[in-house]
Amino acid sequence: MNTKELLTQSLKQALRDRDERRKRTVRLALAAIKNAEIDSRTDLDEPAILAILQKELKSRRETIEGAERARREDLITEALAEIKILEEFMPSPLTEEEIKVLAQEVINKIGATSPRDMGKVMQTIMPQLAGRADGKEVSQIVHQLLST
């Protein structure tokens, strides 16, 4: 069962359980997926769906940052609960070591030798890591590997 089907099943269960927060969070995720499908005029594949969920998670984390500056505990609590719900649909994240191993394989495969080749490496590695690693973390690791 793919992630979109899991989200749909979760929405149905949330409706049955009258779980308002889960229902709202899953509906927003499904709406984001549907909008992307309308924009692309095709059904999205699994990596694209995971990328959308990753964006949703990033949005919630940014909400937390803003709420912390505004000292709004209610918004922080709500965003953390939504993050917890969305993370249920994400694949298990890769460890730093797993990212390093994969990055080194890509670097060797494309023959990258300096930080100038970082764009090529990132372009190759990111589709493989869709939803399993933060782009910022991957970028730091690739930069570190290319600098040595």
Image (tube, helix red, strand yellow):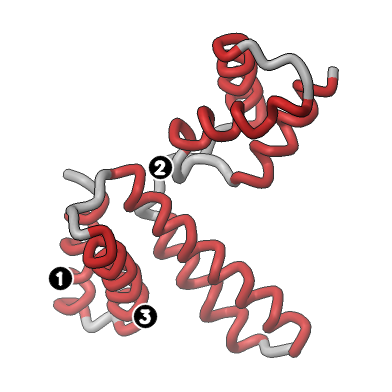
Q: Residue at x 67, y 16 (%)?
A: 112
Q: Position of residue 98 (x, y in %)?
A: 58, 24
Judge the density around disc 2: few (<14), some (14-19), many (≥20) Cα neighbours within 10 Å. few
Q: Can you identify the residue that label 1 sits on?
A: 12
Answer with left or right where residue 82 lies relative to residue 121: left
Q: Can you identify the residue that label 2 sits on?
A: 91
Judge the density around disc 1: few (<14), some (14-19), many (≥20) Cα neighbours within 10 Å. some
* N-term mark: 1 or 2: 1
Label pair 1/2, CB-CB below 8 angstroms: no
The amino acid type, in three-letter code, at marker 3 is Arg
Q: CA distance from mark 1 to mark 3?
A: 13 Å
Label pair 2/3, CB-CB below 8 angstroms: no
Q: Secondary structure at mark 1?
A: helix
Q: Residue at x 27, y 68 (%)?
A: 30
Q: Secondary structure at mark 3?
A: helix
Q: Foreground: 28 or 142?
A: 142
Q: Can you identify the residue that label 3 sits on?
A: 21
Q: Residue at x 28, y 77 (%)?
A: 23
**Above-or-below relation of 99 to 3:** above
Judge the density around disc 3: few (<14), some (14-19), many (≥20) Cα neighbours within 10 Å. some
Q: Secondary structure at mark 2?
A: loop
Q: Foreground: 143 or 50?
A: 143
Picture quarter with the C terminus: top right
Q: Residue at x 62, y 10 (%)?
A: 108
Q: Foreground: 84 or 119?
A: 119
The amino acid type, in three-letter code, at marker 2 is Pro
